[in-house]
Image (cartoon, rainbow, N blue to C red):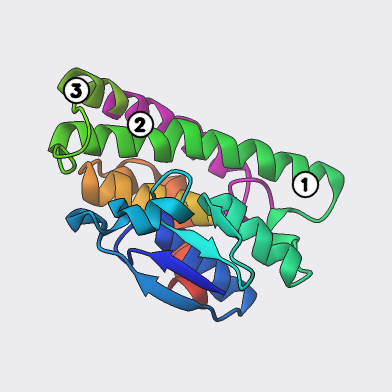
Amino acid sequence: MKIYEFAANPSSRRVGIFLKELGVEVDRVQLNVREGENLTSEYLEKSVNGKVPMLELDDGTCISETIAICRFFAEHQNDTSLFGTTPAEKGLVEMWQRIVELDGLHMGFQAFRNLSGVYADRERCVEAWGNEAKLRVEEFLPKLDKQLAKNQYIAGERFSIVDITGFLFVGFVCEKALEIKALDIYPNIQTWYNKVSERPAFQ
């Protein structure tokens, strides 16, 4: 099996960190998304959405979407602990995963893409939507900080896949792409971020 990815892409990094947490090595094929290598007819025959990362199994089965790929490897390795261990924990991990993705990461992507015009050659960029999306990111951050005031990790007292998603949201989307200094503004996010950053898989 092999993973098609763009190493600088935060979604590819999410899968990479998850695999390090599991101790799994997989062959990688680099596609330069900025140059449109993910838009070739050959790749689009395999990928439902033309995005990276994408996992191609030995039998030709192709799995797109970051969390779907992570779930595959968790089941493949018989280690689903990063998705929760008890019914309640699994529910909370799923809940916070969707919240951080939809209210944080996805909004951040929308803000960056529409404001920067980085992919203006292949999608419609709407500056007004970019500004609104950035505002929604800023409105989400205090909610995340409040959750981390009560918990060691985003979904509770155990590290989970949500913390990988949150790490990329705060470090890449907020701090780097949107220049929102979340780590300076929100002390609980800063404490959590520093703790997660020390894990070997994040190095």
Q: Earlier in the sequence, mark 1 or mark 3?
A: 1
At 33% from the left edge and 37% from the top edge, which residue is drawn?
Answer: 108
Residue 10: quarter of image:
bottom left
Q: Residue furthest right?
A: 87
**Disc 1 crowd, CA 10 A, few/some/many (<14, 14-19, 20+):** some
In this rendering, position of residue 8 left or right of residue 85: left
The answer to whether mark 2 and mark 3 are in CB contact below 8 A is no
Percent x, y for residue 96?
61, 39
Front disc: 2 or 3: 3
Foreground tag (1 vs 3): 3
The residue labelled by disc 3 is 126
Task: Tell me where the magenta segment starts and ends, as one range.
Answer: 134-161
Q: Which mark is residue 203?
A: none
Residue at the disc numbered 2: 137
- Measure the C-alpha gap from mark 2 to mark 3: 17 Å
Magenta residues: mostly which secondary structure? helix
Q: Is residue 81 magenta?
A: no
